[in-house]
Amino acid sequence: MSDHHIRNVIEASLLAAGKPMSISEIGELFDEDGRPDKAQIQTALDALGSEYGDRGIELRETASGWRIQIRQSYAREISRLWPERPQKYSRALLETLALIAYRQPITRAEIESVRGVAVNPNIVKTLMEREWIRVVGHRDVPGHPELLGTTRSFLDYFGLRTIDELPPLAVIKQMIDLNPQLSLPVAEAPDTDAVVVAADTGEDDGPA
Amino acid sequence: MSDHHIRNVIEASLLAAGKPMSISEIGELFDEDGRPDKAQIQTALDALGSEYGDRGIELRETASGWRIQIRQSYAREISRLWPERPQKYSRALLETLALIAYRQPITRAEIESVRGVAVNPNIVKTLMEREWIRVVGHRDVPGHPELLGTTRSFLDYFGLRTIDELPPLAVIKQMIDLNPQLSLPVAEAPDTDAVVVAADTGEDDGPA
Amino acid sequence: MAKPELKLVPTPSDADPSTDSPAQGEMPFALVQGEPVTQLPRDLYIPPQALEVFLEAFEGPLDLLLYLIRRQNLDILDIPLADITKQYMTYIELMQELQLELAGEYMLMAATLAEIKSRMLLPRSGDVISEEADPRADLVRRLQEYERFKQAAESIDQLPREERDTWAASAATDFRRPQSSLPQVALQEMILAFRDVVSRAAMFQHHHVQRERLSARARMTDVLAAVDGGAFLDFMQLFKPEEGRMGVTVTFVAILELMREGLIEIVQTEPYGPLHVRAAQTPHLRLVEGEPADNSTEKDS
C-alpha cells in the first residue's frame, strides 16, 4: 500500500465523513490485505497536516478523532456562506457550562451554590439538546440528584481532545493572614480590614 | 488579493458549504476591497482542479456550480464508512403484522384494542411499503376505517402458499401454555383456540 | 463583559452630588473603553427604562456585588463593606421602587450583607474572635469562587468553536451509499409476536375467548380483494371448485360474514337470476352489526 494511496484514502474518508474519525476507524476502511497499521496512518496524518500548512483547511485532532476543518483565519470569508449570525450563548448558559465542565460531575444544587442563583431548567435543556452535557450518574444523597458532566460532542465542538485542554481556571488569590489585626475590634476599621479566608487554598485550580 | 488566498478561500468554501457553488457565489465571500473577478476565480478553480489530480478528491462542475467530491476510484474504501447494518423490525411492528395476518381483515382500532396501544402510523406505512399488507376494504361503521389484510408478497416472503399455512391457533395456544408466565387465562379453557379479538365473528370453527 | 456601557450612564443634573460619594473617590477606579476614569459616578441613578436592562445583565446577586466591587477597582479581599452594602441596598430599593420582580437571591444577599455589617459592628472579646473567622470571609470566598467561573465562562466563549470560528470540511460522494437491506423476519418471529400479543391481551380481557378459524378470515380478505374495484362481480366467480367442498364452504362463510359486516353487497336483479357481488357502497347498511362490540350475543360465554 503506497503512502500516496494511504494519504488519499485518509483525506477522502475524512472529507466524506465530515466528522472526526479515529485512527482505527480510518484503518478499517482499507482492504484487509493492504491495511496500514496505526503507525503508518499516524505518519500519513502528520504528512497530510503539514501539506495543509498554507491552505484554508487544517487537520485537527479532537476528542473523537481526526477531522479536516476550516482554518480559523478564513472564518470571516467562510461565515458569509450563511446569512444568519452564529448563535451567541448567554452568560448564564456559559457559566453553567463552565461549572459543569470544570467541576464535573456536579449537581444542579452545586451549580446554584456557586452562581448564587437557581439553575434555569431551559439552560440545562439546551445544553442537553446540543449534546454538550449529559447525566453521568446520581449523587448518593437524599433525593439522588443527577450528576451532570460534559460529553465528547462538547469537546469536539470546542476543538478539544480532552477536558484537560480547557483553559486553566484562575487561581484564587492567596489570602493574606492578618490574624493579628483581627484581634482588634473589627468595627473600628471596617473598610480596611483584610479578609482571612480559611481552608480554601488547597482547592483544585484546573479541571479534573 | 494573492492567487494563494483566492485558492484557499475557494477550497475552504467548497468544503464548508456542503453544496455546489457558482462562481459568483464564491466571489461574494471575499471582502469587497479585494474581490477577485470571475476570470480570476475560474483560473483559481482550474489550478485547484489540477492540484487534485492525484488525490482522493476532485473538483467537478455540476449544474448548480462547482463542488469538491470524492473520486469514484476510492468508492470501495469510502463506502465502508457506511456499513450495512442488519436492521431489525420492532416488536410493535411484528405484533401488528401478526395481528393483521391472523385476524384479517382488521382495522387499526381493532389492532389497538388487542395490543392496548395506538397503532403507530409508521408501522403501517412500513408494512405497506414492504408490500406485506394492504387496504382490502373499509368497515361499514362511522369513519369507514380501513380494513387491512396481508398480500401475496407476504405469503411469498414467508414461504406460505396460503394464509391457512400459518400455524393454527391451537399450536400457538400450546406455545402459550408452555410458558407458565403467559398461561393464566388461556389455561382455563384448554380445549379452545385461545384468540382474543374484540371484533370476533363468532363463526364456527372447523379444521384449518 | 456585558455591562461596560452602563458605566457611562450620565449622572443627571438633578441628583445630589454629595450623596453616595465613596471614600475611594480619588483613585482611578476603572478603565472604560481604554480611558482611565478617575471619578466615580455621583450616585447610582440609572434611568428607569435602563434599569431593567441593567439588572437583567446581572447573573445574580454575586454578579451584582462583583460589579460594584470591580467598578471601584477594589481588591476583592478588601471590600469596604459599609459602602458596598449601601450601594447594593440602593439597587435593591431601586428595584423595589420600579416594582421589578425581585429575585429572592438578591434579598438573601441583602440580608447577608446586613448581617455581616451588624456582626462587624458588635464588639467581641478577643478569644471569641480568634476562633471565629472574619464575617466577610465566607462572602469573599463565594465571590472569588463565582468570579473564577465567570472568567472560565468567558474563556470557553473565546475557544474557537464550530459554526462560528471553524466548520467541518466535507466533500460530496457521488457513488451511492450501500443500500441498507430491508430487515429480515423469520416466520417464527412473527408467530412469537402473535403469541405474545394474544397472551398479553388475554390477561386483561378474560372473556371474548372463543374459537376462531383462520381460513374464513383469510378468505374474507380474498373476497374483498376480488371486489376491490367497485364493480359488480359474478357471485360464482368467487368460488373455486377445485378447492373442493371445504374450500367452497369456507368462501361461502366468508361471503356471509362480509355481508353481515356490511362490507359487501349482493344484488339479484330478478328472482333466480345471477347474483352479483360488489364492495359495499352504502355506509348505512348494517351499521350496528358491523361494530366490533356488537357480537356479544354470539360469543361463547
Image (cartoon, coloured by chain):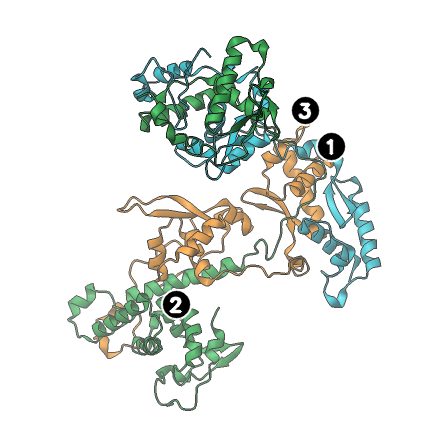
Chain colours: A orange, B cyan, C green
| Element at label 1 | loop
Give the residue at mark 3.
A33
Crowd band around label 1 with a 10 angstrom C-alpha radius: few (<14), some (14–19), many (20+): few
Tell me: C202 left or right of A48. Answer: left
Which quarter of the picture shows residue C19? bottom left
For residue B138, which numbered disc appears in the image?
A: none
Looking at the rendered structure, the kind of residue marked 3 is: Asp
Give the CA distance from mark 3 to mark 1.
13 Å
Q: Is residue C40 above or below residue C136?
A: below
The one of B115 and B84 positioned closer to us in this rendering: B115
Give me the residue at 58% from left, 13% from top. Answer: C240
Q: Are marks 2 and 1 in contact (CB under 8 Å)?
A: no
Q: Position of residue C64 (x, y in %)?
A: 38, 70
Q: Position of residue A59 (x, y in %)?
A: 64, 47
Give the residue at mark 2.
C63
Crowd band around label 3 with a 10 angstrom C-alpha radius: few (<14), some (14–19), many (20+): few
Looking at the rendered structure, the kind of residue marked 1 is: Ser
Give the residue at mark 1.
A2
Q: Quadrant of the C terminus of chain C?
A: top left
Which circle, 3 or 1, is nearer the viewer?
3
- Asked whether the viewer can see residue B198, the reply is yes
Looking at the rendered structure, the kind of residue marked 2 is: Asp
Q: Position of residue A123 (x, y in %)?
A: 43, 56
- Asked whether the viewer can see residue B134, the reply is no
The one of B171 and B138 positioned closer to us in this rendering: B138
